[in-house]
């Protein structure tokens, strides 16, 4: 009987040792699963933060473009107002006086040719015929 009890005790010890290994293995697997789950959460959180940062950057660029456009519009309006305030008037009396002085030279006189017109000999280019032959 003593041998049978020893065999039963040894069997229980082996089964207890196997169960402990199984327990240790399942705890290790649970730890790995928790690590993988934590890693997955970290990756997801990082991607979410990256997306939010990109969205924020896009909104900031859009706001900056709107501010630049508004500043350019304001500059144009200011320039137009300044041009209206400093608008120059033509000197009508001076224009009329110079036109009457030019017309006193005769019908051939223009601002380019003067009062005597163009000399027909200057147009011949050294040839006597009209076609240059």
Image (cartoon, rainbow, N blue to C red):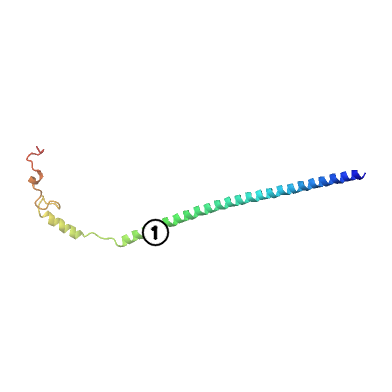
Q: Nearer the viewer, residue 58 or 23?
A: 23
Q: Residue furthest right?
A: 1
Residue at figure coordinates x 15%, y 57% from the top left = 98
Identify the residue under disc 1. Answer: 74
Dividing the picture into quadrants, the one containing residue 84 is bottom left
Q: Nearer the viewer, residue 12 or 26?
A: 12
**Position of residue 85 measured from the top left corner of the image (x, y, whole percent):** 31, 62
Task: Tell me if 68 is positioned left or right of 30 in this view.
Answer: left
Q: Name the spot of residue 120 as percent of width and height, x first.
A: 8, 45
Q: Nearer the viewer, residue 38 or 125?
A: 38
Q: Quadrant of the N terminus?
A: top right
Quick check: 55 left or right of 5?
A: left
Q: Which residue ends up furthest to the front in the rendered image?
A: 3
Task: Tell me the crowding category of disc 1: few under 14, some 14 to 19, or many 20 or more residues within 10 angstroms, Cα based.
Answer: few
Dot 1: what SS?
helix
Residue found at x 34% / y 59%: 79
Q: Identify the residue at horizontal 36%, vertical 60% (top origin).
A: 78
Quarter containing the C terminus: top left
Q: Position of residue 69 (x, y in %)?
A: 42, 55
Q: Residue at x 31, y 60 (%)?
A: 83
Asked whether, in this view, residue 26 is left or right of residue 58, the answer is right
Drawn side of residue 2 relative to residue 37, left or right: right
Q: Nearer the viewer, residue 30 or 71?
A: 30
Q: How many marks?
A: 1
């Amino acid at each position: 009987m003593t041998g049978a009890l020893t065999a039963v005790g040894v069997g229980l010890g082996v089964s207890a040792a196997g169960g402990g290994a199984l327990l240790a293995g399942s705890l290790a697997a649970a730890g790995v699963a928790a690590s993988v789950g934590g890693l997955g959460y970290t990756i997801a959180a990082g991607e979410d933060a990256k997306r939010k940062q990109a969205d924020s950057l896009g909104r900031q660029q859009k706001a900056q473009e709107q501010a630049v456009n508004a500043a350019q519009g304001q500059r144009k309006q200011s320039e137009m107002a300044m041009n209206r305030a400093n608008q120059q008037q033509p000197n009508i009396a001076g224009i009329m006086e110079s036109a009457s002085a030019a017309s006193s030279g005769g019908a051939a006189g223009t601002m380019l040719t003067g009062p005597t017109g163009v000399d027909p000999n200057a147009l011949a280019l050294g040839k006597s015929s009209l076609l240059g032959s």
